[in-house]
Image (cartoon, rainbow, N blue to C red):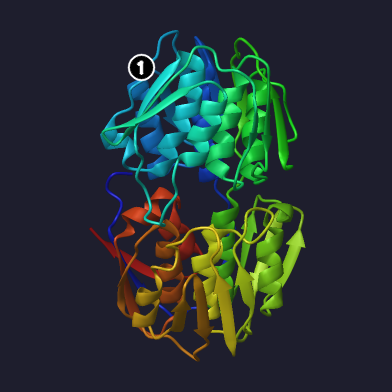
Amino acid sequence: MDTMPEKMIIRGGTKLHGTVDVQGSKNAALPVMAASILLKDGTLSLEGVPDLHDIRTMCDLLSDLGASVVFNGHSMKIDVPDKLKTDTPVELVRKMRASSLVLGPLVARCGRAHLPLPGGCVLGSRPLDFHLKGLAKMGADIELRSGAVEAAAGRLKGATITLDYPSVGATENLMMAAALAEGTTFIENAAKEPEIVNLAEILRLMGSPVRGDGTETIRISGVPSLHSATGEIIPDRIEAATYLIAGVITRGAVTVKGISAGFMEAILNKLEEAGAAIDIFGDEITAKSDGPLKGITVKTLPYPGFPTDVQPQMMAALTLASGTSVIHESVFDSRLLHINEFKKMGAKIEVQDNVAIITGVPALAGAEVCSSNLRAGAALILLALAADGESTVCDLHHVWRGYEGLIEKLRSLGAEISYQG
């Protein structure tokens, strides 16, 4: 994983055809891995874990805290001892924002946590305020000192916490903290994502009576301790969407295998609205297009709305649509940074605040472009696959945080790709 290429050279213009297996969900696996901290002298065994940079970083973080992590293929076993460290190392936490997911379980299990402010993709302000306010309401003392969060508590107390925004990370952190709290916790205006439901399923397997996951109110009755469990990570709906859009943008047909269409309703609806043909058969979804898409309007929203993690890829497809498209990014305030790179390939896009107005063009031209974050990198690869001539996509370290076997999967669909570095 540490020797993945930094540059991808893509010769565009090939219609992609074929089937890819969907990997396990990165955004589901990370909080589930963090939930292992709640165990005292126990083991969490997981299947379907994707082999990604972010997953490896979480493995390193858990190991540094004192857990033993064995990761083989897509199976993971996390053995958690009686005693854990409570200081998280800055060099790991700064690698990804998901490091903040260890905060709630550490405070609940060990009574304290020291967390440097996390890093990861540059997407604008994603403060930990919601996480910290919720933990404070459960009785934790919170201090911000020298660029780090210091949290301390005796046993946390159940509380009713109403989130100002249905933050996925805050919902997950508070669910894990509530699992060992005294009394019952209600999380209102909770996130409803499938990844939240996956975490709740694993917590139930560990002995936490979680109810209401997938709805606006999650109820968790705290227990004194949790026990060892074996669980499975759900498929990655963002990866699946990226490959479906790869089929559409190249005017081919790509099938993703191993995922329920129910996870992807908003994405599939928008692809159909733009003129793509969607076929669903069991756990297989096919997206195909044999001509230009038509312009549509997309607004990113919390689940079950259109996911912000698919916005750059959808924008890539719409650069070649006939007419005008409008994309309103309402989740992250800096998730339009990729537009200047899009323009290097001939895309016509204007930005007003967090709204992108896309005028479709008949063709794109190959260019050298650089990714600013994980999903922007995926979108630039999609543009390169559709563009005339050769493109070089740089700074791929972002992409390896979220896509396993990307080059092999794209080549299996017919893409002409080489790489450097």
Q: Secondary structure at mark 1?
A: loop
Q: Amino acid at mark 1?
A: Lys
Where 339 sits versus 202, above or below? below
Horizontal side, residue 235 vs residue 33: left or right: right
Q: Position of residue 87 (x, y in %)?
A: 33, 22
Among the 4 quarters of the image, the one containing residue 59? top left
- Other residues around mark 1 within 10 Å, as few (<14) / some (14–19) / many (≥20): some
> Relative to 45, is 260 on the left or the right?
right
Percent x, y for residue 71? 44, 30
The residue under the point 74% across, 42% down is 215
Q: Is residue 284 left or right of residue 319?
A: right
| Quadrant of residue 116 within the rendered picture | top left
| Residue that mark 1 sits on | 85
For the image, the number of numbered tags is: 1
- Residue drawn 44% across the image and 75% down it: 383
Q: Quadrant of the N terminus?
A: top left
Q: Residue 58: where, in percent of width, then height?
A: 40, 34
Q: Is residue 30 visible?
A: yes
- Name the spot of residue 369 as percent of width and height, x first: 31, 72
Rendered image quadrant of residue 151: top left
Instruction: Mark yes or no: residue 78 visible.
Output: no
Please determine whether, in this image, residue 200 is positioned above or below residue 410.
Answer: above
Residue at the spot 59% in from the left edge and 15% down from the top edge: 228
